């Protein structure tokens, strides 16, 4: 019998692009273990609209 997983899919959205007003939105989909990581994820990812690496935070 298969186990129920604690991993959930989350969406990471660029924080700098929202503030700058540049059109488009850089988003990434990843998974996290909700038992081990209860707070929101924050990763540095490439933003193709700004053409640089920026901080992406988990959204609801």
Image: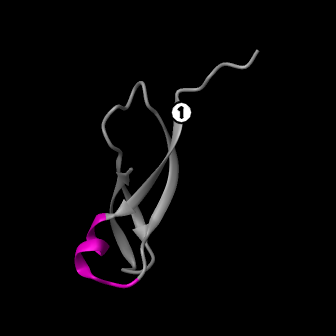
- Find the magenta span and give its range: 15-23
Residue 41 or residue 4, whichever sits in front: 4
Q: Which residue corresponds to mark 1?
A: 7
Above or below, comparing residue 46 to residue 10 in the picture: below
- The location of residue 14, given as percent across then percent down, is 35, 65
The residue at the far front in this view is: 60
Task: Determine the main secondary structure of the stretch shown in magenta.
Answer: helix
Above or below, comparing residue 43 to residue 53 in the picture: above
- The magenta stretch spans residue 24: no
- The location of residue 13, given as percent across then percent down, is 38, 61
Q: Residue at x 37, y 53 (%)?
A: 59
Q: Residue at x 43, y 70 (%)?
A: 26
Q: Residue at x 66, y 19 (%)?
A: 3
- The location of residue 54, given as percent across then percent down, is 32, 66
Q: Residue at x 37, y 32 (%)?
A: 37
- The location of residue 60, given as percent across then percent down, is 39, 50
């Amino acid at each position: 019998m298969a186990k129920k997983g604690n991993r959930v899919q989350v969406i990471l959205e660029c924080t700098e692009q929202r503030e700058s007003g540049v059109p488009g939105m850089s988003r990434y989909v990843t998974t996290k273990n909700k038992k081990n990581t209860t707070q929101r994820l924050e990763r540095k990812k490439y933003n193709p609209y700004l053409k640089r690496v920026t901080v992406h935070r988990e959204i609801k």
